[in-house]
Amino acid sequence: MKVTVNIVRRPDIADPQGATVARALRDLGHGAVRSVRVDRSIHLEVDGDDPDQVRAEVVRMCEELLANPVLEDFDVVVEG
């Protein structure tokens, strides 16, 4: 099954990469840019026939490795 994990930095946590991108865009003349947040998506292919079981397995992967629970939140989308 195809699975997408969307990982976002929590709103109250600074995003230095986003700040750097925003500054660079303004330096390039894109003055309308107020702020940038850089998040990430991870695309997995996981063996399994039960979407709920696959989702639970990927959630465990996120909790153990893929996401930093102190700084980030995540959402798991199973595409079947």
Image (cartoon, rainbow, N blue to C red):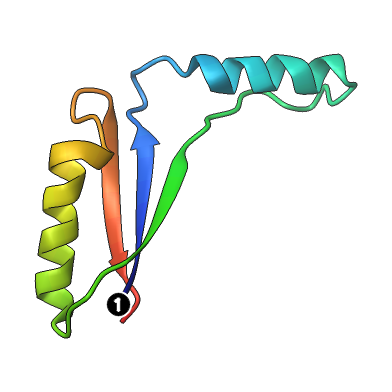
| Residue 41 pos. (x, y %) | 44, 49
The quarter of the picture where residue 25 lies is top right
Q: Nearer the viewer, residue 76 or 10?
A: 76
Which residue: 20% across, 45% down?
62
**Residue 43, relative to residue 74: is it above or below?**
below
Q: Which of the 4 image quarters holds residue 78?
A: bottom left
Q: Quadrant of residue 2?
A: bottom left
The N terminus sits in image quarter:
bottom left
Rendered residue at 28%/45% (across/down): 74
- Work out whether 47 lies above or below 57: below
Instruction: Give the residue displayed 51% in from the left and 14% down from the top.
Output: 16
For disc 1, the neighbor class at 10 Å (few under 14, some 14 to 19, many from 20) is some
* Residue lying at the far bottom of the rendered structure: 49
Instruction: Answer above or below: position of 69 versus 29.
Output: below
Percent coordinates x, y for residue 4 in the rendering? 37, 61
SS at circle 1: loop
Of 26 and 50, nearer the camera is 50
